[in-house]
């Protein structure tokens, strides 16, 4: 009886094995035994031996026909010098929860809803070289000198207020807006987007932001990987799958930024 139960638990809890994995995102520093450093687009197979720099490293992968998995060192991974070593098929495979991150259709969320993240999901806001967010010009009238602003606050310091640029009905937000030169160890900045009503001389907080800066084209790279591993012929559903993984791996993108990136990838 005990032997039967042991076999049962081994079958239920053993890591799933797949023949081919495509990396969408690496958190930490992970490489193959050969020395190849894993990056977005790297290909893996079950028999690959991985060297993790720490037990907190994670690799997001897409498996054709099976979805997204998050791979991390298992409890029996071997510690060797400065690496945690384990064969891929023995690592911990956690199925990524899909579905709650709905892909954007033809609609574009406006400020402040554009900054709202899904409960239980990635709380990061994806900020690119120049992220664009639509806003209601009647609700937020910038023609009279009113302004959107970014407030940056460090504990024990006076808040930094920066006016943000707009173009017609579009708010422009980029990584440079967040830079302060404050490099004091242990101090984490808090970011808030607000709006100053000049006619009322009052300010309104719109959203707290936890930014993830994509300055190397990570979003396009993920879209390429997801598309290359998908057999989906419905363009809108493929777009949803790409949006979901960009959101999960990096953070919530601007609808405008995501759609432009998606179109650029497929234009090539």
Image: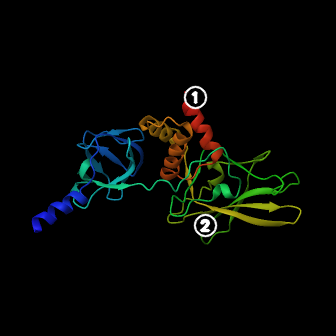
Relative to 261, residue 116 above or below: below
> What residue is pinned by disc 2?
154
> Where's residue 207, x and y in %?
67, 62
- Nearer the observer, 59 or 164: 59
> In the structure shown, which secondary structural element does the residue marked by tag 2 occupy?
loop
Does residue 64 appear left or right of residue 192 in this picture?
left
- Nearer the observer, 215 or 108: 108
Badge 2: how crowded within 10 Å, few (<14), some, or many (20+)?
Answer: some
Residue drawn at point x = 59 percent, y = 34 percent: 263
- Is residue 129 visible to us here? no
Badge 1: how crowded within 10 Å, few (<14), some, or many (20+)?
Answer: few
Which residue appears farthest toward the top when viewing the image? 268
> What residue is pinned by disc 1?
267
> Where's residue 238, x and y in %?
51, 40
Residue drawn at point x = 78 percent, y = 47 percent: 169
Q: Nearer the viewer, mark 2 or mark 1?
A: 1
Quarter of the image for the C terminus: give it.
top right
Does residue 52 appear left or right of residue 100 in this picture?
left
- Nearer the observer, 228 or 174: 228
Q: Are marks 2 and 1 in contact (CB under 8 Å)?
A: no
Does residue 68 appear left or right of residue 183 in this picture?
left
Residue drawn at point x = 32 percent, y = 56 percent: 54
- Nearer the observer, 201 or 256: 256
Residue drawn at point x = 36 percent, y = 59 percent: 56
Measured Cα–Cα span from mark 2 to mark 1: 43 Å
Q: Earlier in the sequence, mark 2 or mark 1?
A: 2
> In the structure shown, which secondary structural element does the residue marked by tag 1 occupy?
helix
Does residue 125 appear left or right of residue 87 in this picture?
right
- Is residue 39 visible to us here? yes
């Amino acid at each position: 009886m005990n032997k039967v139960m042991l076999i049962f638990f081994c079958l239920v809890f053993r890591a799933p094995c797949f023949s081919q994995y495509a990396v969408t995102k690496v958190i930490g520093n992970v490489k193959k035994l050969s020395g190849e450093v894993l990056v977005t687009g790297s290909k893996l197979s079950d028999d690959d031996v991985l060297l993790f720099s720490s037990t907190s490293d994670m690799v997001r992968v897409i498996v054709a026909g099976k979805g997204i998995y998050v791979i991390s060192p298992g409890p029996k991974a071997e510690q060797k010098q400065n690496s945690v070593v384990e064969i891929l098929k023995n690592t911990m495979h956690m199925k990524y929860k899909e579905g709650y991150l709905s892909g954007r259709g033809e609609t574009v969320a406006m400020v402040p809803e554009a900054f709202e993240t899904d409960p239980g999901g990635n709380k990061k806001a994806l900020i690119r070289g120049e992220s664009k967010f639509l806003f209601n010009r009647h609700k937020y009238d910038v023609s009279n000198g009113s302004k959107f602003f970014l407030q940056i606050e460090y504990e024990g310091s006076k808040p930094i207020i920066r006016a943000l640029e707009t173009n017609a009905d579009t708010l422009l937000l980029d990584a440079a807006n967040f830079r302060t030169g404050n490099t004091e160890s242990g101090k984490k900045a808090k970011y808030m987007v607000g709006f100053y009503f000049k006619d009322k001389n009052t300010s309104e907080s719109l959203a707290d932001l936890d930014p993830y800066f994509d300055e190397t084209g990570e979003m396009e790279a993920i879209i390429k990987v997801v598309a290359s591993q998908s057999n989906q012929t419905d363009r809108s559903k493929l777009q949803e799958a790409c949006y979901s993984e960009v959101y999960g791996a990096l953070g919530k993108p601007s609808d405008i930024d995501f759609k432009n990136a998606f179109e650029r990838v497929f234009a090539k």
